[in-house]
Amino acid sequence: MVEETDEARKKFSNAKSISSAQYFGDQSKSGDLEASVSLQKYSGSSSISSAELFGHNSSSSIDLTASELINKLSFQAQQDISSLKNIAGETGKKISSLASTLLTDLQDRIL
């Protein structure tokens, strides 16, 4: 049988929130020191990425300059426009053929 005490109620009665480290006592002071040293290198930064925070190196193949990005987007847009022109041309031919067939059919029925 577990004995219930009011130690936690007394200790944390005015706290808005508590962590498990506060409740159970911090077991690793070295972890706090490592976190503090790690965060100090970002103290002057206005922002950091999660990759930087967790030590993941970003791939250089992902990094693009603005002009490279514009060139890639422009090339893709040109290809898309070309494809749309081809589709529109083929659709126009099909509609023209359908209209011609319809007119011929009407003329045959009338005459």
Image (tube, rainbow, N blue to C red):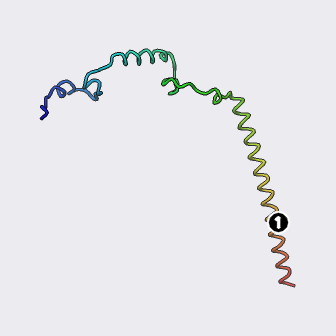
72 relative position to 13: left or right: right
Q: Nearer the viewer, residue 71 or 109?
A: 71
Q: Residue furthest right?
A: 111
16 to 79, vertically: above or below? above
Q: Position of residue 7 (x, y in %)?
A: 16, 25
Residue at (47% x, 16% y) in the render: 43
Front residue (pair 92, 30)? 30
Q: Position of residue 88 (x, y in %)?
A: 78, 56
Q: Which residue is mark 1?
A: 96
- The quarter of the picture where the N terminus appears is top left
Left or right of 58? Residue 88 is: right
Q: Secondary structure at mark 1?
A: helix
**Which residue type carries mark 1?**
Ser
On the image, the x and y values in percent for residue 29 come to 33, 16
Please tell me which residue is depicted at 82% across the width and 62% down the height of the picture. 93
Which residue occupies 48% across, 25% down?
54
| Quadrant of the drawing holding the C terminus | bottom right
Q: Residues within 10 Å of mark 1 (few under 14, many from 20)?
A: few
Task: Give above or below for 7 relative to 89.
Answer: above
